[in-house]
Image: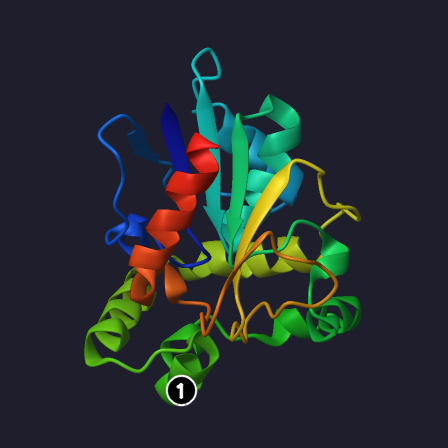
Amino acid sequence: MNLYFISGLGADKRVFQYLQFSPSVNVVHLDWLPASANDSLFSYAQKMAERIDATKPFCVIGLSLGGMIAAEISELLHPHKTILISSVASYNELPLLYRAGGKLGLHQLIPSGAAGRFDFILHYQFGIKSAGDKLLLRQIINDSDRKFSKWAVNAVVHWQRKQAPPSVIRIHGTRDRVLPITGFRPDYIVEGGGHFMIVNKAKEISTLLHQIITS
């Protein structure tokens, strides 16, 4: 079984480094591709889907923004399982503040370097406390592509998908402040899990992924 992983906004495969898998699965990380200015989440998902070998059994696992892309891929390629971690599956599941900000165009006011400031706010939003987690988040942010991040925020607040695909399976934390549980019901709930739980609750999530993939 091939497991295709898609990371979150501004992140890369480092966020998945603490997950553990059975030797029977093959883990493939789909790195972010450059986005065109006129790309929607759907058209971008089409590009990402081209790197998936659909001739063999596979699952798509997306984190945060990657989960939104995975939701689109699920209707393009129909994976064995589509798993969303700390994510949403449609525009209507986004927090009201994000949707309102998109309609008002407030996301266009975000400066390119904003993600690199105000660490204490990021730590609170992501539910991070340990020094190691803070360092990893800082390294990921420093390495992120600001141009891609601005495109992604714009694409999310103009997402055309209004209903979640029925096939998605969701894993979500009860303390996720970036994408809180509003307007949808997770299939698996991680108590105390924040938006960075893929790192600091990796053991629990590894167990859940194994259960879902083998069920």
Q: Which residue is drawn at 48% across and 46% down?
A: 62
Residue indicated by mark 1: 118
* Nearer to me, 105 or 66: 66
Where residue 185 appears, as percent x and y from the top left, is 68, 58
Among the 4 quarters of the image, the one containing residue 116: bottom left
Q: Is residue 93 above or below residue 74?
A: below
**Tally of numbered discs:** 1
Q: Quadrant of residue 146?
A: bottom left
Residue for point 65% across, 38% down = 42
Residue at image x 20%, y 74%? 132
Q: Position of residue 13 (x, y in %)?
A: 30, 48
Disc 1: CA contacts within 10 A as few (<14), some (14-19) or many (>=20): few
Q: Residue most toward the top? A: 55
Residue 191: x and y, percent?
Answer: 47, 70
Is residue 33 something that shows in the picture? no
137 in relation to 63, above or below:
below
- Three-letter code, disc 1: Phe
Residue 118 percent location from the top left of the image: 40, 87
State the SS at label 1: loop
